Amino acid sequence: PAGHEGPCVDGQLEELPEPPPPPSPQKPTQADKKRLLELTRRVAANISVAPGMQAVLAHDLPPALWQPTFAVCVGGGEVRVVTLAFVGEPVFGDRPSSKRAPFLLKVVTDNLAVPPPQAAAPAAAAAAAAA
């Protein structure tokens, strides 16, 4: 374009077709609400420094996570929590919001949309007992 300097990326843009409309939402059942509550609890348990601290302590690093950041990733039938934080020594920066270290810790949970085996076991036992 006129008055533009530097590389232009307009040639790389492509218009995507309109996606189909989503299906009509169905009213959630009690079982759906229970599964959603359980998933919410599993996600919330991982939005903390605890999993990162476990990793740091397992590798004999100083017990500190600098600028921890959490991302909830949802897609393809999966839900995962990613934790990123600076770890190790030496530590640079004068405020907690600017402290950093030479290493970046990345912890990615398993798929939290799938209940852990110990949570599934009582449900299977109850189903077998009812049969």
Image: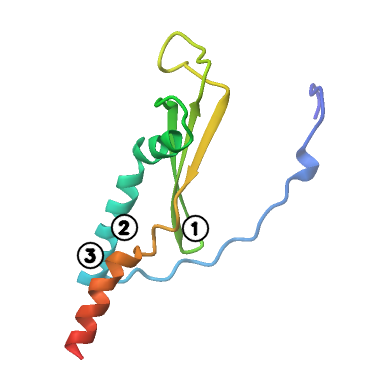
Check the image and report above or below for 48 versus 86: below
Binning the other alpha carbons within 10 Å of mark 2 as few (below 14), some (14 to 19) or many (20 upward) gives some
Q: Is residue 106 visible?
A: yes
Do residues under tags 1 and 3 come within 8 Å of each other at their CB atoms?
no
- Read off the residue under disc 1: 75
Question: Residue reaching furthest front?
Answer: 60
Q: Quadrant of the N terminus?
A: top right
| Side of 111 relative to 6 (left or right) | left
Q: Which residue occupies the foreground of this view, 17 or 75?
A: 75
User: What's under tag 2, amino acid-wise?
Assistant: Leu
Up the image or down, 43 lies above or below 87; here it is: below
* Distance between mark 1 and mark 3 Cα atoms: 20 Å
The numbered mark, 2 or 1, whose residue comes first in the sequence reads: 2
Mark 3: give few (<14), some (14-19) or many (20+) Cα within 10 Å: few
Residue that mark 3 sits on: 34
Marked residue nearer the N-terminal end (1 or 3): 3
**x, y percentage for residue 55?**
44, 39
Name the one closer to the observer, 11 or 128: 128
**Residue situated in front as seen by the camera: 14 or 74:** 74
In this view, the residue in front, 29 or 111, is 111
Q: Which residue does the image show at 77% across and 37% down from the upper left?
A: 9
Cα gap from disc 2 to disc 3, whole angstroms: 9 Å
Q: Are marks 2 and 3 in contact (CB under 8 Å)?
A: no
Instruction: State the CA–CA distance, disc 2 to disc 1.
Output: 14 Å
Which disc is residue 24 wearing? none
The residue that label 2 is drawn on is 39
Position above or below: 58 against 91 = below
Identify the residue at image location x=51%, y=34%. Answer: 105
